[in-house]
Image: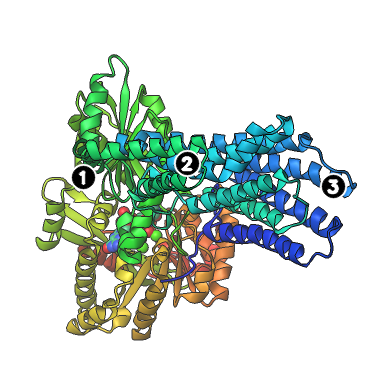
Amino acid sequence: MTAEQPVGRSGSTGIDVSSSRWWSLGLVTVAGVYSIGLALRPGEDFSPFVDGFLALLTVWVPAAVGWLVVHRTKCRRLEMILAAGAISCTAAGDTYYVLMSAGGADVPLPSPADVGYTGFYVLMLATLAVVIRRRLPDMTWPVVLDAVVGALGASAVLAVVLDPILSAVLDGPRSLAMALGAAYPLLDLLLVAAVIGITATTGRSIGRGWALLVLGLFTFTGADIGYALLELDSLYVVGTPLDASWALGLAMIGAWVVMQGRNEPLRRETFTVPSQAVPALATVASLFVLILGTQVRVALVAVVLASLTLALAALPLVFRQRIRLADMRHQARTDELTGLPNRRALYTEVPSRLASSGRRRSAVLLLDLDKFKEINDSLGHDVGDTLLAQVAGRLSGQLRSADLLARMGGDEFVIHVDNCGVDEARAVAVKLRAALAEPYDLGGVTVHVNASIGISCHPDQGQDLTMLLRRADMAMYRAKSTHSGHFVYDGGEVTSGLKQTHPLQTLKDALSEDQLLLHFQPKIDLDTGDVRGVEALVRWQHPDLGLLEPDDFLQRFEEAGLMPGLTGVVLGKAMDQAAAWAAEGQPLTVAVNLSAPSIIDSGLPAQIDAMASAHGLSPSVLVVEITEDLLVADRDRACRVLATLRAMGVRIAVDDFGKGYSSLSYLRELPIDELKLDKSFILSMTEDSRATALVVSTIDLAHSLGLDMTAEGVENADAYRALSDYGCDVAQGFFMSKPVPATELDAWLADRRQQPRTGPFSILYPDRTAEGARRTP
Ligand code: C2E
Ligand code: CA
Ligand code: CA
């Protein structure tokens, strides 16, 4: 598998995986350098470099990185903003503290620094609240119970640890300072309880980097408790290893923010906890606290918390059966790969949503990825799964909590948008497609994927889900075949919608019952006016629908995984025709279009070789045309297959050049002979001077790489003449001939032979010489 793919610049929001790793590493490094500084620092005096500069670096770097990530993700995630704010509060507090200490002052408790520190807890708790709220929709009762048990258990243990501090506050002189000294650990306790609670909420996944946040908060909390214990005896001094723990904790919290800023959650890397682990641990810990209470003095709060934990932990045992059932029902309705509701959930939920919608309108959007199968086939199912998980993440990110997003199966998603008319549904479709269009980082391979969306509206276009889905499906195929992105079902399009759907069986019939045929379009040498060869273009003689063009069916063959079969048929027919022309004494090369699955099929060269010799032909009668977009697939393998073909004498052409998002680097790497400039450039050449400039410079580019340049879409004499002037080698287009059946092409060729050909312009001015043509515009 290739490590790097030729794609355009990523204009995505968020940060990609590799830079997120660098950023996290940077954060930990800063904390590490500070720790080393602390270890090496001489004496007890305030060291301006270590206690001033480095210490401030360890708080401001995570803060700055946090805000940078928030900015890069366009402030889309509230929990990231809150966490960045929390880090900044600590940074502000520390700055005050450090500046005062540097001046030799003893910082009192409370001081303005405590405003910043308190801010940290408030914002961090808010961060966790947002995370919890986000998880709420898919929490079942047993899960909530587990969370509470976990949180209580953690509190019980912390209450034991914090006992000296708490009792000092309660027993000793009540001062604001002491109250604050106790408040921090108590706030820590809340944080830890919340974190443990959230960790208990699911046995599956908690989102990327959760472990970092947990570790970060634990480290931070540990430092707080250490500080509070030392302060009981006024022992805390600046510049001990304790300070390093805060720095490390902040670095990890910062790294968590960075992870959240990654383009989307990657399912396989999420942190998972066995579902019963947290409540089980909480139970053991509470038992321990209670047993400890029989041996030594333990705070009353701790005993109460531990007892509560045990009581609640026992509850699930009592209701085990009912709870298990509820949990199973939840799982049965969840798609395991993406965590979204599945088809079953869709069919139970949407009908009740429709029934309760009253007079509100709503819309069903059916979304299907374009060319997903190609990616799955060429890059493997793991990569396909990763892509689907990322797609799910992006889609949910764009929807409101009232919308229902479900995975139907494969690469099909359904969205039910309540309270939504046609225009709103269109807007949603545009938004979803835009979110999906950003490049995907699939563990080193970057791919671009588009989606087509069909829309049907309730109640106008269907009263029930089945009807709505059927019509959204028709609209979706319409969107695919017209490349329009999205399409709203409209009654009038039923037939053409149906026409596009082509059930799988009819596709198989097309192959087995010989319904495919080829049309041929000549390629003209602009230097001599000779016919260089022809391009074979497939057509489908459909039993009901008549002659269909590739745009009407190729995509369906591709999705059905039948492309290799189609390519085989086309190759066979192309060879038949080439052999016929050779036998008639007018040998012509035939260009065949290959799709991605064919080009990475290492059996292809042998297949072509066998076909050619069976026809008594040299493989050099064949030109294969490949498109740039197939290079998202396995480029190394494609390169090997192409090199073998070329060694056999097959010419390789890059089709639709300039249409995709390719980088030029593959021109250097791929073994190719010919560039076919996409017809959009030629078609707009006459009115668009930029298109002309591109045409001219692409011709230069091709020639300087030793490649032949072919122009497609030559529709008129002006284009033909201009291309000839620019030095283009070959022209193809309606001006010379449309793609036609072989018999018609034969007639066209015969007709041409009748006319005196005296140069490149004979096709324009059959009765003049080339010189004459040049002189007479
Ligand atoms: P393509 O390879 O770029 O083929 C050229 C397309 O441009 C053909 O459309 C042709 O009819 C059209 N064309 C030719 N001259 C002109 C012109 O002067 N003006 C305009 N506007 N169009 C012109 P067609 O036959 O509909 O094929 C569409 C696409 O379907 C092809 O684009 C190719 O990508 C694909 N295709 C066709 N046959 C096969 C096949 O056997 N296998 C595979 N994998 N793909 C095929
Ligand atoms: Ca082509
Ligand atoms: Ca083309």
The N terminus, quarter of image: bottom left
Q: Which mark is residue 156?
A: 2
How far apart marks 3 and 2 lie (CA) works out to 36 Å
In this picture, residue 776 sits left or right of residue 582 = right
Residue located at (31% from left, 28% from top): 363
Q: Secondary structure at mark 1?
A: helix
Q: Is residue 228 above or below residue 133?
A: below
View quadrant of ligand 1? bottom left
**First in sequence: mark 3 vs mark 2:** 3
Q: Is residue 163 left or right of residue 476?
A: right
Query: Which residue carries the number 3 mark?
Result: 101
Sequence-first disc among 1 and 2 = 2
Residue labelled with disc 1: 501
Name the residue nearer the viewer: 133 or 46: 46
> On the image, which quarter does residue 320 sit in?
top left
Q: CA distance from mark 1 to mark 3?
A: 75 Å
Q: Nearer the viewer, mark 1 or mark 3?
A: 3
User: What x and y, as percent, mark residue 121?
Assistant: 62, 37
On the question of residue 461 being in view, the answer is no
Amino acid type, mark 1: Thr
The single residue placed furthest to the left in the displayed view is 513
In the image, is 146 to the left or to the right of 721?
left
Foreground of the two, 399 or 538:
399
Please tell me which residue is depicted at 75% across the width and 50% down the height of the picture.
Answer: 235
* Quarter holding residue 455: top left
Place of residue 26 in the rendered image (x, y in percent of width and height, measured from the top left): 65, 60
For marks 1 and 2, give the CA distance. 62 Å
Q: Secondary structure at mark 3?
A: helix
Tell me, for residue 765, which label it has, or none: none
